[in-house]
Image (cartoon, grey):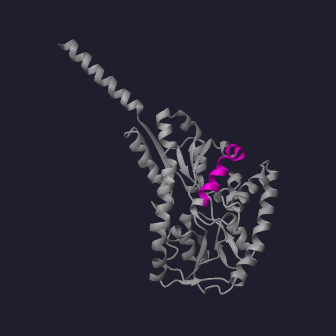
Amino acid sequence: MRRILNRTALAALSLAFATEAMATEWNVSLWGKRRAFTEHVEKLAELVSEKTGGEFTLNISYGGLSKNRENLDGISIGAFEMAQFCAGYHRDKNPSITVLELPFLGVESLEQEIELSMAVYNHPATQADLARWNATLLMPSPLPQYNLVGVGDAPATLADFEGLSVRATGGIGAAMETVGAVPTSMSATEVRQAMDSGVVKAVSFAPHAHMSFGTIENAAWWTTNLNPGTVNCPVVVNTDALADLSDDHRAALLESVDEALDHYVANYNGKTMDAWGPALDERGITRVTFSDAEIAAFKEAAAAPAAATWIEENTARGLPAQELYDLVTGMIAKGM
């Protein structure tokens, strides 16, 4: 009897070890708090767990694993398996994807932003660029065109931006320079304090971020149609960790991306944008709309010079910069 019991116990123990060995947990480094910008990651975690019966879980951390500007570094050393970052935080580390941050590209929807991003992400030069950090691009975090929320007197014309300190990264910052603004690059989590202390007088964000990071709480005005561009913030995974997944777990992850992005877009176009107008109204924030002539002049001053500079600088880095730029602008011109 004892021998039978011992065999039974040994079999149960072996099964327990086998079950534990099959379980996979990934740590995911985000920042701030759960918001429209992170809904695709939250949905991805839900889908992966469902498809694997709980054997593969994504443990999402909002700032507990790394600072947002250091997420790509954390991926490179395997400090965590998945992370989100924005290209404009460290343009020299990911120059290939900054083509998507050039001003006045003419992107009109989140769906279009996804298609453009994935085309750039799948380009061999982009994959080689991110491979330097042992990173594989998984999916974008599509954002609408940025606009400014500011304090003080509302700008009546673009000339009123002369000397105005503005939080704006990447191509948006370059565009704002052409109208005399003084762009400052800082992470989203630093913006509210900078605005309250007067370090910046205006902040360039998408609507969800203006609400999430509190820039509208003491704001006086918002630009409705400046639309200089957006930022590109991919979700990446550690390449070695991806390769180490079982075939079933890898399939569960990769096959869930489209559904996670669909959820993100539906949430942003619905819940987030439905809340935006009322949020402005409740705080008495003035809407500033510029004339078509001024927007056209802004685009003419900013778009071509920024593109030419980007192509020249990144060709010198060894990237096929003209090819990447033509890929993006060609897709937009064809209506995708």
Count how many numbered circles sit on residues in the image.
0
Magenta range:
112-128
Above-or-below relation of 158 to 95: below
Q: Which residue is situated farthest in the left direction here?
A: 1
Question: Considering the image in quadrants, where does the C terminus appear?
Answer: bottom right
On the picture, is 283 further left or further right than 97? left
Above-or-below relation of 222 to 187: below
Predominant secondary structure, magenta span = helix
Q: Position of residue 78 (x, y in %)?
A: 56, 41
Q: Position of residue 230 (x, y in %)?
A: 63, 65
Foreground residue among 104 and 6: 104
39 part of magenta stretch = no
120 part of magenta stretch = yes
Q: Residue at x 55, y 55 (%)?
A: 67
Q: Position of residue 134 (x, y in %)?
A: 62, 41
On the picture, is 275 further left or further right than 327? left
Residue 179 visible? The answer is: no
On the picture, is 63 further left or further right than 115? left
